[in-house]
């Protein structure tokens, strides 16, 4: 019966582009998981086990076929309200403590398990105030399991969960799995760990073998093996339906947003390199000597460069970093919507931009005696922030488009291109190179800055505003395309 | 599978080896293993300490710089003292030559490229340091 299927994979195929052609990994897979089952997914390396899990969790989109998770598309955040996941390759944020991280992930779910209970379940009470980076391999694996349990899941998807576990952690893990089974939590698990077979023999209801597609491959790729434990579908139907309806609640988006912003701010304050950069750049406006007659000009242009760097580094840089670490992949397995995630990043970036500008102007007025009144200050600040929006969107698009490890270098090159094409650097002849500058959004940003501060400008304000709007839309499409592409080729 | 006479003789040879020699071999292997484990432990300890050492060095450096800047502001408030000696001979920006501007720009951007691409420094501190280089060159050229 469809309503009892927590996972439905219907005629799903997935191919990846490798070398000079498309290489099929999964072909016409039909696969369902009913409530209360404990399914083991097996197969040799490269058979496509992790790809199949990624498709089920909505991390990838199938080349053909349809997938349903909790009767919804796995791309929808709501489909993950009662799903807990342990990924094979994911790192947690470095600048958060164990308790803070669990509380953050709790905020994504409509009916989370209390923090104390989770910490007790995975035996991490003593480590609750430890940095996530200070945990051993086994403790980290227990933390990942805690994050999977935090949403009070109805379905657990576990990809090699016993990897890196020490003897004690291993025993605790299986105790937890037994407890989950007692509570009739449905489990889909991938494991290649030989020592798991003893426990699996006792607990699993079904084993599914995934064959690797090769040139000689013929027949079905997915072969289901016998039911190992007696499993009663009728019994599960009676016990679970009433409980499910009472637990599911509307998702508290604003609470998730608040917690996300709080976590962003904590991480920001605990990143010394970033703080050093902010204070260095803000301090430059006061330390560096510049002539009084050009003080305002220097101050405004320097603020523009600082804001550009903050926007690109803080928004796109953070996304690229979390993508490289695998944390973004984990977040996609939770009910946190991409809109909430990006909104939190944008609001934090705006706060940092406002703080940077305030510091720069206070230092400049106090130390260098720049003559500027408060309404003018507000007007310049708003224009600077408005003008930097297209470049923040560009950074976001680049963070999804390029290899996250190269983001730092690419963004540095972007800033250099920006400085070169903003019109303040004399370009060599021919005239064409100077005319081309007018097409650069950086040039229009500079003109907007000049206009807002009453400096020498070309008087084409509407053209500059329209050009920046056009750039925002173009970069916005690029960011959306890159985000969707990331889900296909992840 | 039944053993051949050749296998049997080999087994007999093994049995007949002096027990002291076997014990020595076992001790030697145990020693090697212990040394390997010790080396592995040491490597793990060093690797885990390295990032925290870098981090604390960075924090210390940042605090030191902040301290210097704060002291400078406290001491020089209201006076004509300049942080950089070049500030007494400031040329108005409009008087700097195009070649001077070009070289200052090249210096600043090269610093940014070296710091971010070759040294892996984060974008924000790298931009700050590049701006310092650009400004110093801008004043001196």
Image (cartoon, coloured by chain):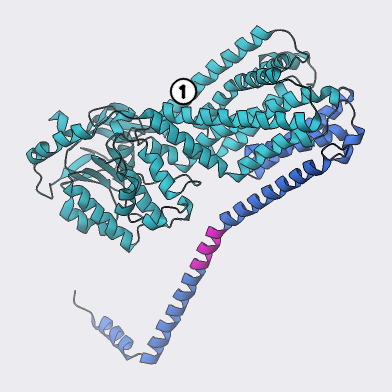
Chain colours: A cyan, B blue
User: Residue at 32% across / 59% down in the picture?
Assistant: A169
**Among the 4 quarters of the image, the one containing residue A413:** top right
**Residue A163 belongs to magenta span:** no
Q: Report x, y in % for residue A240.
A: 15, 38
| Magenta-tinted stretch | B41-49
Q: Report x, y in % for residue A124.
A: 36, 55
User: Residue at 71% across / 30% down in the picture?
Assistant: A362
Q: Report x, y in % for residue A16.
A: 39, 33
Answer whether residue A475 is visible to the viewer in this image: yes
Q: Secondary structure at mark 1?
A: helix
Q: Nearer the viewer, residue B89 or A319?
A: B89
User: Residue at 55% across / 59% down in the picture?
Assistant: B49
B36 lies above or below A215? below
Image quadrant containing the N terminus of chain A: top left
Q: Report x, y in % for residue A456.
A: 78, 14
Left-right relation of A3 to B108: left
What residue sits right under mark 1 in the picture? Answer: A480
**Among the 4 quarters of the image, the one containing residue A378:** top right
Task: Identify the main secondary structure in magenta.
Answer: helix
Image quadrant containing the C terminus of chain A: top left
Left-right relation of A474 to A11: right
Extreme-right residue of the structure: B89
């Amino acid at each position: 019966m469809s309503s009892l299927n927590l996972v439905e994979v219907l005629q799903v195929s997935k191919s990846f582009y490798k070398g000079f052609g498309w290489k099929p990994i999964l072909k016409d897979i039909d696969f369902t998981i009913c409530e209360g089952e404990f399914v083991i997914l097996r197969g040799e390396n490269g058979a496509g086990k992790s790809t199949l899990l990624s498709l089920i969790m909505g991390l990838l989109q199938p080349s053909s076929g349809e997938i349903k998770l909790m009767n919804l598309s796995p791309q929808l955040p709501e489909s993950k309200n009662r799903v807990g996941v342990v990924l094979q390759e994911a790192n947690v944020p470095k600048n958060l403590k164990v308790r803070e991280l669990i509380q953050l992930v709790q905020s994504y779910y409509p009916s989370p398990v209390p923090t104390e209970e989770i910490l007790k379940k995975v035996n991490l009470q003593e480590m609750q105030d430890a940095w996530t980076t200070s945990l051993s391999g086994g403790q980290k694996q227990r933390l990942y399991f805690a994050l999977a349990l935090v949403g009070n899941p109805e379905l657990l998807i576990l990809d090699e969960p016993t990897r890196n576990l020490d003897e004690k952690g291993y025993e605790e893990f299986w105790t937890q799995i037994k407890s989950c089974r007692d509570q009739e939590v449905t489990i889909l698990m991938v494991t290649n760990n030989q020592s798991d077979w003893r426990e699996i023999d006792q607990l699993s209801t079904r084993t599914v073998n995934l064959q690797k597609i090769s040139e000689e491959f013929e027949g079905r790729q997915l072969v289901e093996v016998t039911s190992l434990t007696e499993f009663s579908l009728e019994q599960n139907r009676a016990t679970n339906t009433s409980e499910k309806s009472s637990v599911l609640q509307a998702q508290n988006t604003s609470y998730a947003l608040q917690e996300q912003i709080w976590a962003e701010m904590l991480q920001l304050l605990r990143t010394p390199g970033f703080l050093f950069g902010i204070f260095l750049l803000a301090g430059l406006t006061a330390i560096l000597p510049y002539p009084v007659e050009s003080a305002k000009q220097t101050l405004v242009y320097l603020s523009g460069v600082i804001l550009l760097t903050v926007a690109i580094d803080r928004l796109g840089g953070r996304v690229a970093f979390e993508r490289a670490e695998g944390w973004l992949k984990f977040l996609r397995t939770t009910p946190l919507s991409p809109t909430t995630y990006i909104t939190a990043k944008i609001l934090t970036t705006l706060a940092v931009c406002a703080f940077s500008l305030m510091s720069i102007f206070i230092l400049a007025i106090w130390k260098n005696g720049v003559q500027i009144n408060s309404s003018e200050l507000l007007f310049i600040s708003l224009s600077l922030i408005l003008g930097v929006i297209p470049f923040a969107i560009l950074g976001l698009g680049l963070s999804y488009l390029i290899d996250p490890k190269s983001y730092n270098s690419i963004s540095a090159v972007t800033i250099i291109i920006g400085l070169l094409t903003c019109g303040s650097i004399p370009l060599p002849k021919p005239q064409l190179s100077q005319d081309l500058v007018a097409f650069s959004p950086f040039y229009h940003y500079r003109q907007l800055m000049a206009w807002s501060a009453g400096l020498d400008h070309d008087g084409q304000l509407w053209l500059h505003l329209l050009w920046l709007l056009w750039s925002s839309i173009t970069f916005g499409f690029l960011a959306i395309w890159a985000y969707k592409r990331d889900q296909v080729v992840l | 599978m039944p053993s051949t006479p050749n296998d049997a003789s080999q087994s007999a040879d093994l049995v007949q080896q002096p027990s002291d020699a076997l014990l020595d071999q076992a001790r030697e292997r145990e020693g090697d293993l212990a040394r390997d484990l010790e080396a592995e432990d040491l490597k793990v300890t060093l690797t885990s300490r390295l990032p925290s050492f870098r981090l604390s060095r960075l924090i210390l450096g940042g605090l030191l710089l902040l301290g210097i800047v704060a002291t400078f502001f406290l001491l020089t408030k209201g006076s004509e003292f300049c942080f950089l000696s070049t500030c007494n001979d400031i040329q108005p920006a409009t008087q700097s030559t195009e070649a001077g501007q070009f070289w200052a720009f090249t210096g600043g951007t090269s610093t940014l490229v070296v710091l971010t691409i070759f040294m892996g420094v984060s974008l924000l501190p790298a931009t700050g340091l590049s701006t310092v280089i650009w400004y110093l060159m801008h004043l001196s050229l």
